[in-house]
Image (cartoon, grey):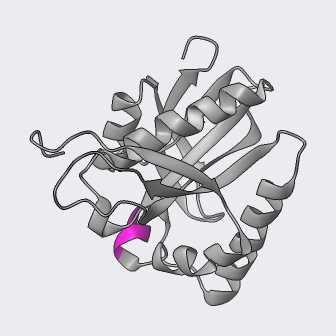
Amino acid sequence: MDENRPAAAVRLEPWSEGDAELLRALNAPELMTHLGGPESEEALARRHRRYVDLTADRTRAGRMFRIVLLPTGAADEATGATAGSIGFWAREWAGEQVYETGWAVLPAFQGRGVATAAARAVAERARAEGLHRHLHAFPKVDHPASNAVCRAAGFELLGPQDFEYPPGNPIRCNDWRLDLERF
């Protein structure tokens, strides 16, 4: 992140039917390198439907959001621009019911602290749901930017874990955990 640039300020807006094009933009090869590569149009349509349904579900099982930039005073900022996506969802991990989070930031907004600000904001949303104590993130061990986001957002590194993502694609991830009761 540029040390001379003000820290990013973001607003999380609920994922909606109109966010399908954002999902397509986030499916770019350079953004999907650590997630098994770009998805097919059919897979994107299914993912979009899951995001819309998760956001509409009021069981506190999670939410998906688009990340929108707020004013910070930077001369070149694109206030009000959609910068990416982030969300949290319920899952079982290591015998515990937890939330998991994941994010993607469009290339034009990377390196500005957008993902870190969004991770903090989504942690607040997950904490407000009051359902689970911990929020986990699982970036690949060889993805320095996402691991740096976890560190900067206050997550604790628990260590590497073996995963399959997408199913059938084995990967090695770091398990980062944020205690929502102490956040």
Residue closest to the eye, 74 or 171: 74
Percent position of residue 26, x then y = 47, 72
Which residues make up the magenta segment?
Answer: 30-34
Q: Is residue 65 above or below residue 137?
A: below
Percent position of residue 127, x then y = 67, 26
Q: Is residue 174 visible?
A: no
Q: Is residue 170 above or below residue 140?
A: below
Chief secondary structure of the magenta span?
Answer: helix
Percent position of residue 106, x then y = 38, 67
Q: Residue furthest left?
A: 4
Q: Is residue 43 visible?
A: yes
- Residue at 53 percent of width and 75 percent of height: 22
Relative to 138, 77 lies left or right: left
Residue closest to the eye, 31 or 52: 52
**Quadrant of the drawing holding the N terminus:** top left
Residue 101 covered by magenta stretch: no
Percent position of residue 69, x then y = 40, 55
- Residue at 62 percent of width and 49 percent of height: 87
Q: Residue furthest top?
A: 182
Residue 32 covered by magenta stretch: yes
Relative to 118, 114 lies left or right: left
Q: Residue furthest bottom?
A: 41
Residue closest to the eye, 15 or 45: 15
- Count of labels in the image: 0
- Residue at 49 percent of width and 68 percent of height: 36
Residue closest to the eye, 98 or 11: 11
- Residue at 54 percent of width and 17 percent of height: 183
Q: Quadrant of residue 116?
A: top left
Q: Quadrant of residue 99?
A: top right
